[in-house]
Every structure is written in structure tokens, then in C-alpha cells.
């Protein structure tokens, strides 16, 4: 194939989109076919996602995309770790959301009784996040009814194609994948009391999962293939990041700020474990050595609480409002569940004996500078743990539009920031499909060179 039109279904924790990428050897053009909201839905037994609604939005978006021109294939990515329980191919309940406070207390405690943190890190290489899939499974009292568990993008792929697989990059966020062999760690599953037959076969990005089932293809307009991509959104984002040398760090800046390095081999030292660095599986066997920093979630939750919709206006005001504000530790678990972040910042400041920011504009300024400080620390630590020196920081994702935050990251880290593309995740998604179709590639460097040729990046120099 010389070119193609590839659809990316990209599901984020606060919004989803269906993007169409036109890809040729020297072209990469992206257009949105549909955008739709997403978010945790509270219920009696905790926070859930509405995956049925996401599937419906995806199919409607694909139909819109196909109406503008035939699609070559479709790939699906979403946030990591969350899963649905199925029986005989049917979803038993809507998946839980990883921000469910109650479950996040139960799971880690149950796992800790069965396996120590040091051994767990040697086996799966993951930072401790109280919501990693294995902890959620340990807190799940509904597994007996299920004969399968599928991660969110695999659930959507199964709804579209009737084929159930587990895509490997996202599987690496479950905590049940062996960090060295990248196969299911069945011994760990058994020790945790998990039925190994619950987990579907692993496939790699580029694998053809199946074709749209008739009820879906009738609506979309064609019986196109569903192709596995880096189905963990962060895996796709880093494919779409124009990294061009070993001294480049990245921040995939959305709900989370995922800050770190791409490596060939995991770093499994005690220092890496204690500082909460993760070794997630990337496309083509790469390792994403990074830590999760609380990202634009703090801003979106704050604005949601206030009933304020003008984020850009608030950011402009906060950037101009040059008064001293405290830098709070955004990594504190108190900021994880939904709620009033301004009040929690006040509480944090009270507990740490510092003066809280006064008023809304100062609160936004405090959040931006605090995120930047945590990101800069993460990059510095990643470099030292991996034995690298850093010369540039790439910021991709929605947060690349937040110039106040990008400048603050440059200032705090003392490194130049290259911001963009905003749609790195959808770009990484379509590029892996385009490579599978023989349009581009074969290396990640080839894909990134195409991103660099077709996208302008904004540069932020650190202030002295
Ligand atoms: C970002 C992300 C991140 C995970 C979190 C649950 O959307 O996938 O990489 O840690 O969601």
C-alpha cells in the first residue's frame, strides 16, 4: 500500500475521540471525526465507567469517519489498568474506575499478604499504584461469575470484532506480566488465587484482531479490520512522540503526566522501586521507564468543582498573577479520588504548615507550578536511575497546549521543552496501523521521523 486512511478510537479518562489519520510515506494528516465526553460514573458499589456508551460513541464516530471516505482499518487505545468481567462473551457489569477509593484500600492490603513488594517489583517491574489491575482483581468479589477478564481497549475491540485478545503493552500495566519475558506470569496469578484461564491470549501491536461484525459494519459502512495498536494510550503516545536521541525525555501530559525515558531494558533496582519508577511495555519491545505524576486531572477537577469552564482564561490569569504560591506535593494520594481539589490543597498546606494559596487564580497557579515541580523531579530521577543525561524534554498530549505549564516545566527542570503533537496518542495509534499495512516504517525511528517532518513543535527555553 502507498497510503491509507486509518481510524483511531482514542479513549481518555475525561474524553474520547475518533480520529482519522491519512498516512503516506511523506504525509500524516489527522482529523477528528467525533469527540465525546467520558468520566467516572458513581454507583452504590463504587465508581464505574460506561463502556457501553463508549462503544456506541466509537461506532457512531467510525460511521462519520467512513462517510467521508473508506477506512483501511481501525485501532483502539484507552487509559490502562481497568478491566471488565465477562461470561460467555457478555459483559457482566460496567468496569470499575481506578479512582475508586474504597477498592484502592482493599486490594494492595490483600496482595501484600501474599507477596512482598520487592519480589513483586522483580517480577513485574511496575511502580506501586494502588489501582494496578492485580490489586483491583484482589479486591474484586465478582470474579467467580466470570470466565474472562478483558482490559478496556480489548473490551471495545471484542465488541467490534467478536474476538477476545489481550494486547501486550496494556497487559504490562496489569502487574501480571513478567517484565523480562513479557508473557503472563501464571505462577504469580496462581499465588494470588487468580484463575489463569480468565486471561486471554497476548497479541502484539500490528496484529489483526478480526473484522467488524455485521451489526457494526452495517452501521459503519465497511467490513474493515480491527488492528491491535499500542492499546495502552501512553504506549501509543510515545510512538507518536518525535524523540530523536537518547538524551530526550518525554512527558505524556493529559489526565496524568507520565514523565520518563524510553529504554531498551528495564531498570529493576531497589532505588527505582523505592522512588516508584515503572517499566511499562512499549511498542516493539521498548520499555517506558517513567513515573505517574498527577496531571491535568487536578485542573479539570478544580474547574469542575467551581462550575468554571474557561480553563484557558484561568491559566492566562494564573500565569500573569505573579505572587508567591506554595508548591504542594501533587503525588499525595489525597488528590487521586474525584472531589474539591482547592479544599484538599488547603488541607495539604495546613498539614505541612505552609500558607495556602488565596483565591482561585492563586490556586490554579499553585497547581500548575506544583505539577511542573513534580515533573521536573521525575525527569531528573529517571535520568539518574537509568544513567542518562537529558538535553531536551518532549511534552505531548492535550497538556502540550498549556503554555504556562510547558514554560514552568522548562524553568523548573532547566531544560528546553519541545511541545507537541497534541494528538500524539492518536498519531501513534494510526502509525502502528499504517505500518502493519505496509505504508510506513519499519522502525519506530521511521515513524517518529514522519511525525517530525509533518508537525511543528513549540519550543520553551528555560528562564535563567
Ligand atoms: C493515562 C494512563 C496511564 C495510567 C493511567 C491509569 O491515560 O493510561 O498511563 O497509569 O492512565
Image (spheres, rainbow, N blue to C red):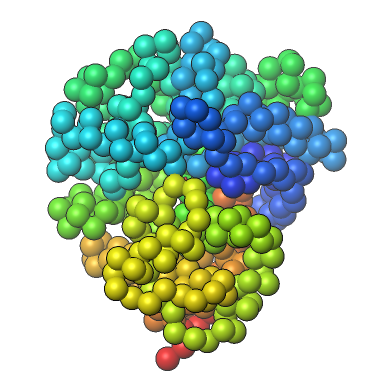
Do we see residue 448 in this rendering? no
Q: Residue at x 29, y 73 (%)?
A: 353
* Quarter where residue 372 is shown: bottom left
- Where in the figure is residue 142, as x and y percent of width and height? 40, 17
User: Does residue 368 appear to the left or right of 196 in the view shown?
Assistant: right
Q: Residue at x 51, y 45 (%)?
A: 233
Q: Is residue 196 above or below residue 382?
A: above
Q: Residue at x 28, y 54 (%)?
A: 277
Q: Is residue 460 above or below residue 374?
A: below
- Where in the figure is residue 424, as x and y percent of width and height? 58, 55
Q: Quadrant of the N terminus?
A: top right
Q: Nearer the viewer, residue 4 or 90?
A: 90
Q: Is residue 302 above or below residue 203?
A: below
Q: Nearer the viewer, residue 274 or 387?
A: 274
* Quarter where residue 117 is shown: top left
Q: Residue at x 20, y 38 (%)?
A: 120
Q: Nearer the viewer, residue 342 or 3?
A: 342
- Where in the figure is residue 88, as x and y percent of width and height? 51, 8
Q: List the single residue furthest toward the bottom.
A: 464
* Quarter where residue 202 is shown: top left
Q: List the single residue furthest toward the top.
A: 88
User: Does residue 100 appear to the left or right of 121 in the view shown?
Assistant: right
Amino acid at each position: 500500500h502507498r497510503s491509507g486512511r486509518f481510524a483511531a478510537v482514542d479513549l481518555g479518562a475525561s474524553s474520547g475521540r475518533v480520529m482519522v489519520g491519512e498516512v503516506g510515506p511523506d504525509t500524516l494528516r489527522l482529523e477528528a471525526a467525533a469527540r465525546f465526553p467520558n468520566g467516572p460514573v458513581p454507583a452504590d458499589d463504587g465508581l464505574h465507567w460506561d463502556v457501553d456508551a463508549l462503544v456506541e460513541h466509537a461506532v457512531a464516530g467510525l460511521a462519520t469517519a467512513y462517510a467521508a471516505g473508506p477506512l483501511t482499518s481501525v485501532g483502539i487505545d484507552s487509559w490502562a489498568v481497568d478491566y471488565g468481567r465477562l461470561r460467555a462473551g457478555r459483559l457482566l457489569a460496567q468496569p470499575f474506575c481506578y479512582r475508586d477509593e474504597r477498592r484502592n484500600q482493599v486490594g494492595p492490603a490483600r496482595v501484600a499478604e501474599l507477596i512482598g513488594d520487592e519480589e513483586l517489583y522483580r517480577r513485574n517491574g511496575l511502580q506501586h499504584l494502588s489501582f494496578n489491575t492485580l490489586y483491583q482483581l484482589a479486591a474484586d468479589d465478582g470474579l467467580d461469575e466470570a470466565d474472562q477478564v478483558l482490559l478496556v481497549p480489548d473490551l471495545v475491540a471484542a465488541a467490534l470484532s467478536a474476538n477476545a485478545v489481550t494486547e501486550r503493552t496494556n497487559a504490562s500495566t496489569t502487574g501480571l506480566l513478567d517484565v523480562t519475558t513479557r508473557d503472563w506470569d501464571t505462577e504469580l496469578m496462581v499465588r494470588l488465587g487468580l484463575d489463569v484461564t480468565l486471561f486471554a491470549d497476548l497479541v502484539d501491536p500490528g496484529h489483526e484482531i478480526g473484522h467488524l461484525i455485521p451489526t457494526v459494519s452495517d452501521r459503519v459502512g465497511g467490513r474493515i479490520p480491527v488492528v491491535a495498536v499500542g492499546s495502552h494510550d501512553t504506549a501509543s503516545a510515545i510512538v507518536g512522540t518525535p524523540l530523536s536521541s537518547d538524551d530526550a525525555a518525554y512527558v505524556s501530559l493529559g489526565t496524568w503526566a507520565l514523565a520518563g525515558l524510553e529504554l531498551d531494558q528495564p531498570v529493576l533496582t531497589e532505588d527505582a522501586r523505592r522512588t516508584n519508577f515503572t517499566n511499562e511495555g512499549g511498542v516493539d519491545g521498548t520499555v517506558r521507564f517513567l513515573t505517574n505524576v498527577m496531571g491535568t486531572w487536578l485542573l479539570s477537577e478544580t474547574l469542575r468543582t467551581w462550575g468554571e469552564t474557561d480553563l484557558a482564561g484561568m491559566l492566562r490569569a494564573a500565569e500573569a498573577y505573579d505572587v508567591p504560591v506554595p508548591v504542594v506535593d501533587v503525588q499525595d494520594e489525597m488528590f487521586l479520588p474525584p472531589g474539591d481539589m482547592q479544599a484538599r490543597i488547603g488541607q495539604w498546606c495546613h498539614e505541612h504548615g505552609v500558607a495556602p494559596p488565596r483565591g482561585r487564580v492563586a490556586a490554579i497557579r499553585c497547581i500548575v507550578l506544583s505539577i511542573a515541580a513534580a515533573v521536573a523531579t521525575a525527569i531528573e530521577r529517571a535520568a539518574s536511575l537509568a544513567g542518562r543525561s537529558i538535553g531536551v524534554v518532549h511534552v505531548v498530549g492535550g497538556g502540550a497546549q498549556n503554555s504556562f505549564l510547558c514554560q514552568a516545566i522548562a524553568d523548573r527542570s532547566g531544560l528546553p521543552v519541545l511541545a507537541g503533537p497534541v494528538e500524539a496518542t492518536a498519531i501513534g495509534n494510526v502509525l502502528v496501523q499504517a505500518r502493519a499495512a505496509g505504508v510506513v516504517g519499519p522502525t519506530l525511528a521511521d515513524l517518529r521521523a514522519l511525525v517530525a517532518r509533518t508537525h511543528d513543535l513549540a519550543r520553551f527555553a528555560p528562564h535563567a
